[in-house]
Image: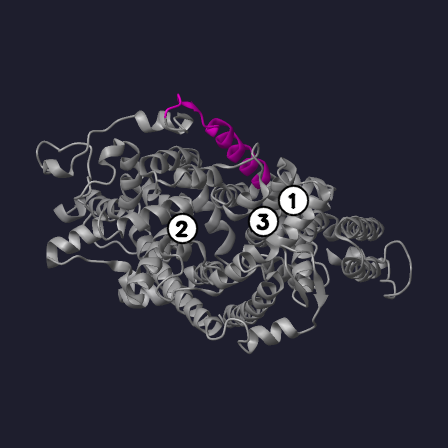
Amino acid sequence: MATLAEKFGLRKASGVGEAGWGHTLIVALVSLIYFLPVLMIIFTAFKPSAQALSVPPTLSPTSLFGLIPDQFVFTPTLENFGQVFNRVMVSGNAAEPTGFDVFFFNSFFISSVSVLLALVIGTLASYGFSRYPLKGNDTYLFIILTTRMLPAIVVIIPIILMFRTVGLSGSYVGIIMLYTAFNLAFTIWMMKSFFDELSYDVEDAARIDGSSEIKVFLKICLPQVVAGLAATFVFGLILTWNEFLFALLLTGVDTRTVPVAMNQAVSSGGRGTDWTLLASIETLFLIPVFLVTFFLQDHLLRGVTFGTVKR
Amino acid sequence: MTTTAQFLPAPPLLSPVAHNWKLALLAGLVVSVIAIVLFPARLSVSVVGAMVALVAAAFAVNAYRRRYYGGLLVAPAIAVLFVMNIFPLLWSLGLSFFAYQSNNQSIRFVGLNNYIKVLTNDIAAPANWDALINTGMFVVFTVALQMITGFLLAMLFAKQFPLRKYLLILVLTPMMLSVVASGVFFSYYYDPTFGILSYVMGEITGNQFILMDSKVGAVAGIVFTDAWMWAPFVMLLVLAGLVSVPKYLYEAAAIDRVSKARQFWTITFPYIRGLLMLALLFRTIEAFKLYDLVYILIRGGQDTKTIAYLITEIANEQNKTSEGAALSYVILFMVIVLTNLYLYLANRRNQGA
């Protein structure tokens, strides 16, 4: 018979276990505090520019039935989101398109293609590293890890020179290839640990039954690591989506991504940071990657578990 | 599976057969380096491209003849990494032996001089060592705070409870922000006049509160922001370990009346150790490269410059490309030594367990 405490989930459950609404309350409190800085950015996106930098800082769009004093309350508006795409660039002129629709498309296109490409190439390679070890396998893996160790600024100068000489700077191909390489190290390390976890028994049975190596990979191994693919995709997407330095130096006007455009938009004109504009761009920019993570969340947990726990 | 590759003996290093990829790689590297040193950039790029194609062809032929699927599978990844990462890396390694300025095209071989300059503090005197100490400090503080926060958050989310999915995504969001936005907004939160932190502290103490006024405050601000952004990464990895612990282990332990602390160390910890180490490895590598937050929050003021900041400054603003490259290779060497030591320890512990 469940006691009252158990009914509300207050019983001490260890490790993996069930907990009730009591636990939800505690976690909700912690999560909301953790989320607060993000919430403030999202709220700023809805503030009228005049209230963006008020003292004391405005904190809430509603007074919550008089719970929050008036001085902390701002009047929400949707105006800022329109400003992202159309705004007055030179004072006195009419509002003109800012090109952010293109920048959003660029971010979307460049990130998704390069992360998918890295996933395909990296998965093949990690399968190779896992199943058909080369001589000096560990050395290769370590060299691949090394590519992530240097600050970007060190490799960027040769890359700029290289892109200029072969005419790749400012093109989609160049930046996509660069991001593919940028994601490969992580993809290979992550996916290899997933393949290492698979039991060889099923594969060997299939081989004995006459399956070709390609069939073993596609029909037996790959379906077992779908979760890992999802996890790697999300991590790669988050990193690529927000990459700044390479994008700043290697994209042209047509291929500019949102982080670069965002940086330029908010600091141009010498009037200091445009807070509401920055907040509304970031809020819009957050939505796609937030949704992808949310829908792949279950895979993300299961995926990482499957791959990296038992060695 | 590797035994299938053994019927064709490996050729001696110097024999010119089509499947001798080691020779091709060696020749490719030598020719590439010579081309970079001797020829103008446009020509050397095509030479290197041809060398890459040569190595790739040798790889493919070798793989085909030996049914050496490993080589075939790995080749595309190696090719992309070679063109986009390893080649530029070697190029900048080459640059570190020259006096080269990216603004004017003069180039002059100076051997180890850049390294001697960097190491003996000829150029930026004590700044290098200060930046080195700062980097070490940031690595220790940010990684420690991320690991602790991430671990505690993971413990909270380890159970199944209502609305778990929706609360988890809230905690994961900081990781998804772009550094520009989160950095700029944290500089607003820390702002002495407009910021929420100063407002709250001002209400409590009655004095104006300026976080970035001292080195301690500036470091705390940067560490807090970085840890806030990346603790979710640690959390996700640890959480994956926690949810994978089979329930029956806890049930058996409960029957044997094993204490909670002992349950944690003997059951839970072995499951999350590998993941903690992976998180530690990737976060440490990233922490060594800390630059953007230091720039956005305080522009390197209050003696908070890190090595990555210094390298960027040297390579960018002072146009001393090769000295920047030399400095970064000193760092790379340190990170490689640390990582190797770390992987060695991790492997030894895994084998011991």
Residue furthest out toward the bottom: B120
Residue A181 or residue B253, whichever sits in front: A181
Locate residue B75, reporting x and y percent. 73, 50
Q: Which residues are magenta?
A: A92-115
Residue furthest out toward the left: A66
Locate residue A249, reporting x and y percent. 56, 45
Q: Residues within 10 Å of mark 3 (few under 14, many from 20)?
A: many
Residue A170 figure quarter: top right
Q: Could you tell me how far apart the alpha carbons at marks 2 and 3 are, in whole angstroms?
A: 22 Å
Q: Please give the residue where the numbered disc 3 appears in the rendered image.
A: A182
Determine if marks 1 and 2 fall on one subunit: no
Numbered disc 2: secondary structure: helix
Residue A182 or residue B246, whichever sits in front: A182
Q: Residues within 10 Å of mark 2 (few under 14, many from 20)?
A: many
The quarter in which the N terminus of chain B is drawn is bottom right
In this view, the mark in front (3 or 1): 3
Q: Please give the residue where the numbered disc 2 appears in the rendered image.
A: B236
Q: Residue at 48% of width from left, 31% of height from top? A: A104
Circle 3 chain: A
Which secondary structure is most common in the magenta stretch? helix
Q: Could you tell me how far apart the alpha carbons at marks 1 and 2 are, in whole angstroms?
A: 25 Å
Circle 1 chain: A
Q: Amino acid at mark 1?
A: Ile
Of mark 3 and mark 1, the one earlier in the sequence is 1
